[in-house]
Image (cartoon, rainbow, N blue to C red):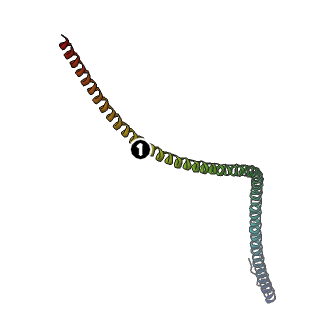
Amino acid sequence: MTTVSPSPRQKSAASAAVTILVILSAAICVLCIIQWVVQSKLRERIEEENKAKNAALAHGSEQEAQAKRYSFEIERLDKESKGSQDLIRSNKFELSALKLEVNRLTHDNEKLTNSVETYKAAYEKANAAILQQNEAVKTQNAALKTVAEERNALAEKYNKLAEDYNKAVTEFNNLVEQVKKEREAAAQAAEKEKK
């Protein structure tokens, strides 16, 4: 084969074509790099938006869960509030019943206090009467003691008198015996004389 050598014009046209091709290749590379940078930025942006979307979804889910929790808590608090109101009503009823009971007990206490005062006055009156009776008994005891002493003195005098009387009776009886003996002796002597 024969080789054909290119003409300078062809060489310069080929060289210009290669240069154009190199420039076009470089431009395409630059374009690819720009496209690659733009796409990576877009991917980053999409990734950030996905993260934001996921965060928003997670936040939304969290908000929904929290809303459910709040809803349950509100229901529970409503039930407790209703129970508390029922308890308050019940307590008010019991309180009114207790107030009535306190009033009744206060009235009973006043009655008992008045009764105690009455009993106390009666006790004091009875005590005063007993003290008076005790004084009267003491006076009577003193009088009885005096009477008993006088009686004892009289009994002693009577006993002395009775003793003296008994002595006199004994002496009289002795004298009567003596007189009787003397009469018998005189009668015996008179009979002896008669004989």
Q: Position of residue 11 (x, y in %)?
A: 78, 87
Q: Amino acid at mark 1?
A: Glu
**Residue 10, image x and y in percent?**
81, 86
In the image, residue 43 sits, relative to residue 122, either above or below, namely: below
Could you say where residue 173 lies in the image, as x and y percent from the top left? Answer: 29, 26
Q: Residue at x 42, y 40 (%)?
A: 151
Please give the residue where the numbered disc 1 appears in the rendered image. 149
Name the outermost residue toward the top. 195
Element on which disc 1 rests: helix
Dividing the image into 4 quarters, which one contains the N terminus? Answer: bottom right
Picture mark count = 1
Instruction: Please state if 14 lies on the left or on the right of 106 as rendered.
Output: right
Hey, which quadrant is residue 179 in on the image?
top left
Where does residue 87 sit, x and y in percent of width and height? 74, 51
* Residue 17 left/right relative to 161: right
Question: For the residue carrying disc 1, how many other residues have a C-alpha within 10 Å: few (<14), some (14-19), or many (20+)?
Answer: few
Extreme-front residue of the structure: 194
**36 on left or right of 177:** right
In the image, 153 versus 162, the foreground residue is: 162
Determine whether 46 is above or below 195 in the image.
below
Q: Quadrant of residue 33?
A: bottom right
Give the quarter of the figure containing the C terminus. Answer: top left
Residue visible at 53% across and 47% down in the picture: 136
Q: Depth check: 111 or 55 in front?
A: 111
In front: 30, or 56?
56
Q: Is residue 178 above or below residue 193?
A: below
User: In the depicted view, which residue is nearer to us: 190 or 176?
Assistant: 190
